[in-house]
Image (cartoon, grey):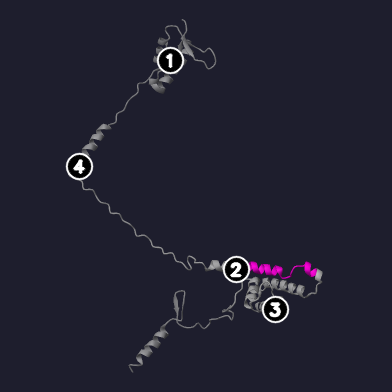
Amino acid sequence: MSAEEPVDSQAQAQLEQPFAMVYGQAVMEMPLDLYIPPDALEVFLEAFEGPLDLLLYLIRKQNINILDIPVAEITRQYMGYVELMQSVRLELAAEYLVMAAMLAEIKSRMLLPRAETIADEEDDPRAELIRRLQQYERFKAAAEGIDGLSRVGRDVVVPKLDAPQARARKLLPDVSLEELLMSMAEVLRRGDMFESHQVSREALSTRERMSDVLERLKGGGFVPFVELFTAEEGRLGVVVTFMAVLELVKESLVELVQNEPFAAIHVRARAE
């Protein structure tokens, strides 16, 4: 009785395993309405990428010299494969039929009798096909060589490791009470040096400046116009002096004289 218990427990465990997992849910029994189409599973033993690939396969399989292709035998084997493709998957046979027509044309040209003079002048009907097969063979060999190289993600895995978060430990300075008091005293001393105060500018009067200009011109001689201005007074002084001169000219108390265009301007008081 004890020897049969492990067998029963193992069978019970196998019965409890799910039949399949669908969207994360376990399916314990086979669905009754499950339909599997007859063409759900297809096995391809030989896969060709085009008609030239098929021709190259047939030539290599029989160890035929590519420069001396027996067109009749190759055409027969090629058409057998095309008929198989039409019966299995019709949409793949379109581009292969073009090559079949080319093989049939080459075969017919080689079977037709030709005169010796014409045969010497014409090229071999297989020349164009041989050239295309040689070119395709070179490109296919180069593609296989490139595919044989190591590829990142397929043959080579680049490891990636995130760097740990570095936390720098900040060491606090050891400050004594005496140094703290000295720093505080320095801050207070610098604060006393930057006390703010307001500087008021003395207002300038146009009437007073008119009197000053007349005082400068009391001698009756000509005075250069630029000498009436003082650079220390800044822009305000220039504006007030210019307005004072304009008022004096308006009241006919002074006159402005310029000998020629762009020459220096002179000011003189008018006679009473």
Q: Indicate which disc, 1 or 3, sits on the residue closer to the N terminus.
A: 3
Q: Indicate which disc, 4 or 3, sits on the residue closer to the N terminus.
A: 3
Which amino acid lies under the numbered mark 3 shown in the image of this protein?
A: Glu
- Pointer 2: what residue? 140
Q: Percent x, y for residue 12?
A: 39, 87
- Pointer 3: what residue? 73
Is 182 placed left or right of 124 in the picture? left
- Pointer 4: what residue? 179
How far separated are the C-alphas under marks 4 and 1?
60 Å
SS label for mark 2: helix
How far separated are the C-alphas under marks 2 and 4?
83 Å
| Residue closest to the eye, 162 or 149 | 149
Is 189 placed left or right of 155 in the picture? left
Q: Is residue 74 above or below residue 121?
A: below
How far separated are the C-alphas under marks 1 and 2?
97 Å
Is 187 placed left or right of 83 in the picture? left
Please identify the quarter of the rendering in which residue 164 is found: bottom left
Which amino acid lies under the numbered mark 4 shown in the image of this protein?
A: Glu
Q: Is residue 107 above or below residue 230?
A: below
Residue lying furthest left = 178
